[in-house]
Every structure is written in C-alpha cells, then in structure tokens.
Image: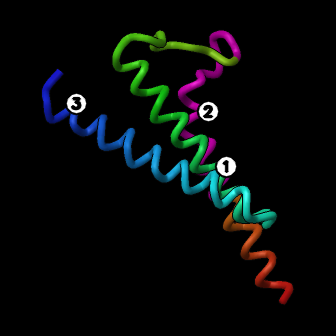
C-alpha cells in the first residue's frame, strides 16, 4: 500500500470520526425529524468508511451478504446514507410547503 493511499484512508477516517461525533452531539439536542434523518445518514456513512477500511486491510471478507447471493452489506452501506439524506430533505420540503 502506498503512503498516499494510506494518508487518504487516515484523513477519511479522522474527518468521518469528527463529523460523526458532531452529529451525535446534535442528535442529543434535536428532536426534529429532518435533522434526525440527516444525522442517521452521517452515522451510516461513517459505518461505510469503517467497513471499507476493514475490507481493504482484509479484516472483513469482500463479499458479505445480508441476503445470501442477493444483497451485499456494501450495497446497503453505500446507498442508505443517500436515502436518509433524501428523506431528510423531503421532510424539510414538506414542512416548508405547509407553512
């Protein structure tokens, strides 16, 4: 593994950890549905960062299935944050429409 690739992994882990920490702090202070969805998206995104790092180092096998032969964990971890972000934005749009 090249040092540039290792540095990229370390930076991604540190920035993701800081962002997730701040999201968890915000979670304790808010009860707003839209914000909760965005916070959950950040937390799942950090889970994806951890999973891909563990997979890169060979700690986790490359093909872990949630549903054997059909649905990989990686597919969920990559797409779920975007779904949560989209749901949060949708809730905000609905709220601003009713005001």
| Res 76 → quadrant | top right
| Few, some or many residues within 10 Å of mark 1 (<14, 14–19, 20+) | many
Q: How far apart are marks 3 and 1 (CA)?
A: 27 Å
Q: Residue 61, how many percent across, how many down? A: 47, 10
Q: Circle 3 sits in a helix, a strand or a loop, which is it?
A: helix
Residue under circle 2?
76
Q: 83 and 48: which one is in front?
A: 48
Select label 1 or label 2 by which is in front: 1
Contact between labelled residues 2 and 1, with CB atoms less than 8 Å apart:
no
Report crowding for label 2: few under 14, some 14 to 19, many 20 or more residues within 10 A (C-alpha). some
Please report the residue visible at 81 percent of the width from the left and 64 percent of the height from the top: 31
Name the element at disc 1.
Answer: helix
Q: What stretch is highlighted in magenta?
A: 67-86
Q: Earlier in the sequence, mark 3 or mark 1?
A: 3
The residue wearing badge 1 is 40
Q: In this view, does 68 lie to the left or right of 12?
A: right
The magenta stretch spans residue 69: yes
Disc 3 designates what residue?
Answer: 6
Residue that extends furthest to the bottom in the rendered view of this protein: 99
CA gap, disc 2 to disc 3?
25 Å
């Amino acid at each position: 593994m090249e040092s540039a690739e290792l540095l990229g992994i370390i930076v991604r882990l540190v920035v993701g950890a800081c962002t997730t920490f701040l999201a968890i702090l915000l979670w304790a202070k808010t009860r707003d549905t839209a914000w909760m969805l965005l916070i959950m998206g950040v937390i799942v995104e950090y889970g994806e960062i951890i999973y891909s790092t563990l997979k890169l180092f060979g700690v986790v096998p490359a093909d872990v299935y949630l549903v054997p032969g059909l649905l990989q964990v990686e597919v969920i971890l990559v797409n779920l944050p975007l779904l949560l972000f989209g749901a949060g934005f949708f809730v905000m749009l609905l709220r601003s429409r009713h005001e």
